[in-house]
Amino acid sequence: MGERLVYEYAVIRYVPDIEREEFVNVGLVMMCKSRRWIRAQVKVVPERLAAVGAAHRLPDIERQLLTFTQTAEGNASAGPVGMFPPEERFRWLTAVKSSCLQTSRPHPGLTDDPEAEFARLFSRLVE
């Protein structure tokens, strides 16, 4: 067994109507501070959006979700936030929002392989 690393993750959610408190999981963001590692991935299933009465067009949702992946990657197109260290980008991405795209509260965990843990969580929580 390798070195045990602390990580944090949050599920990215599409919320069509804040007052109904319904959502669809559309992505995952995960960070390991000791490795200076962050990753975000999204997957939108149109049928799931339709089931909760999506109030937004799919291309608009996908365009907004792109900011999550660009920010996690440290892409210059994400603006100044994209240049922050990984843990600060994670905090920015998981800050409480009153918008159609939100994240769960961050959850901690231990792993010896952040990439494999990310894949496991993404499969379980998003796909």
Image: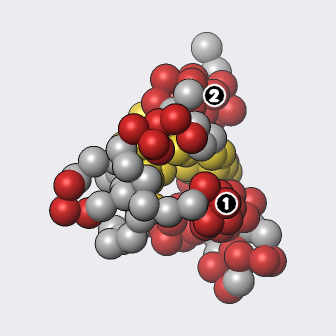
Q: Is residue 97 left or right of residue 92?
A: left
Number of numbered discs visible in the structure rendering: 2
Near-viewer residue (42 or 44): 44
At horizontal 37% and vertical 56% (from top left) the residue drawn is: 15
Q: Position of residue 108 (x, y in %)?
A: 39, 41
| Tag shown at residue 59 | 1
Compared to 52, does 94 lie above or below? below
Compared to 53, does 127 lie above or below? above
Compared to 102, does 23 lie above or below? above
Q: Position of residue 46 (x, y in %)?
A: 57, 41
Q: In which quadrant of the rendered image does the N terminus lie? A: top right
Residue positioned most to the left: 19
Amino acid type of disc 1? Pro
Q: Is residue 3 left or right of residue 9?
A: right
Crowd around label 1: few <14 · some 14–19 · many ≥20 (10 Å): few
Q: Is residue 9 left or right of residue 106?
A: right
Amino acid type of disc 2? Ala
At horizontal 67% and vertical 65% (from top left) the residue drawn is: 63
| Tag shown at residue 119 | 2
Decide which of tag 1 and tag 2 comes sooner along the chain.
1
Near-viewer residue (15 or 117): 15
At horizontal 52% and vertical 44% (from top left) the residue drawn is: 26
C-beta proximity under 8 Å, tags 1 and 2: no
Whole-angstrom CA distance, mark 1 to mark 2, is: 25 Å
- Identify the image quadrant of residue 19: bottom left
Near-viewer residue (126 or 73): 126
